Amino acid sequence: MYIPPQGIYFRLVGHASQHVLFSRNHADPEFWHYKGPEYEDQLFTLIYGTGSRAGLYAIKSKRTGKVLFSRTSQEPFVGHIDGNGAYSDNWFNLEEGSGTYAKLFRLLYPATGVVIFSRTTLDPQVGNCTKANIYSDQYFSFAFEDMVVKSVEYDVALGKILNVISHVLADHTLRNNSYHEQEVAFDFSENITHTSTFEYTTGFAITAGTEFSAGIPFVSEGKISIGASQSNEWKFGTQNTFTRTYAAHFPGVKAGPHQTVHAVSAVQQGTLEVPYTIHLASKSAGVEVVTKGLWHGVSSWGLHHDIT
């Protein structure tokens, strides 16, 4: 599970309720959950624990500067408080889920073994309960603030070229049934659609559909390269397509009396796999993160002609 660095802001989305937690000072309730338009009071960041609190996190509001607490000793059992993590009940283990709850987490206060819940079916809608009985309303996910893609790097040295085939673009035949030499010109122009995807492996979880510009891996002289001047508009997490046009002109192909000339134009086509690293920065403060994964693309190269 990806845990963001301090300074990256996110919303805490309840898995069952689809409400987000908020922290505010101007109206009651000051701490609760909400489903609707986005506001700054829904944004939080993590404070990483150190020393005896290593592996634990305080959750700090961008709007109020307060951190969440979860306790059993007095009401309210959950809420927010000043102090920047001064109290033990401000520190949580982000307990990763599994199975149905994979990629989700519970906000667990280890000292008492209670987790925060967010629900709409029972009152109280927000509170805490023992971690022993697992329910969907105990799980949350991160919805990150807007990010900007700064650069994309491909590790072409570790790239692979797979499943290579010959793809015929044009096939022309000239049959000369006369007693005289004949000459014909061949022309062709064919489009090949290339498809590709960015597969996520580790690091910051980029929102599906995020748009950015980056170079296109291609094959040159049997090796994978990245065009320095050529780039494409990509959408992360979806299949991207672009078209490459191949064209050629044969001004004069001759066939002798009662001969047949066969001209074939073809390219190599295969699947490329190239590891990538995407560098991003938050729009709000420029905090940088990285995403790593594997770029998959169907590509073509090596236009060649055979005349027999």
Image (tube, rainbow, N blue to C red):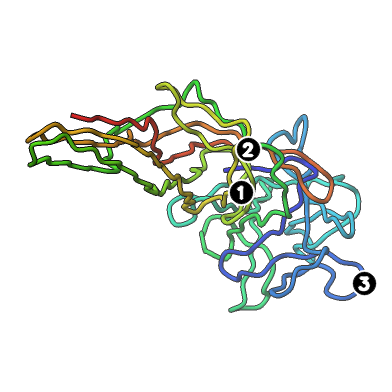
Vertical side of 261 occupied by 210: above or below: below
Left or right, residue 59 beside residue 26: left
Q: CA distance from mark 2 to mark 1?
A: 10 Å
Vertical side of 62 occupied by 31: above or below: below
Q: Residues within 10 Å of mark 3 (few under 14, many from 20)?
A: few
Q: Position of residue 83 (x, y in %)?
A: 91, 49
Q: Residue at the spot x=29%, y=37% of the render? A: 265
Left or right, residue 179 beside residue 261: left
Q: Quadrant of residue 179?
A: top left
Q: Which mark is residue 206?
A: 1
Taking the image as drawn, is residue 89 in sight?
no
Judging from the image, what secondary structure is the residue with disc 1 in?
Answer: loop
For disc 3, the marked residue is: 26
Q: Quadrant of residue 149?
A: top right
Q: Residue at the spot x=51%, y=44% of the render? A: 198
Q: Nearer the viewer, residue 270 or 6?
A: 270
Q: Nearer the viewer, residue 300 or 275?
A: 300
User: Looking at the image, do the residues carrying marks 2 and 1 touch, with CB atoms under 8 Å apart?
Assistant: yes
Q: Residues within 10 Å of mark 1 (few under 14, many from 20)?
A: some
For the residues carrying marks 3 and 1, which lies nearer the camera in this image? 1
For the residues carrying marks 2 and 1, which lies nearer the camera in this image? 2
Q: Say which label, 2 or 3, has the lower sequence index.
A: 3
Q: Position of residue 286 (x, y in %)?
A: 81, 43
Judging from the image, what secondary structure is the residue with disc 2 in?
Answer: strand
Q: Say which label, 3 or 1, has the lower sequence index.
A: 3
Q: Residue at the spot x=68%, y=59% of the render? A: 12
Q: Residues within 10 Å of mark 2 (few under 14, many from 20)?
A: some
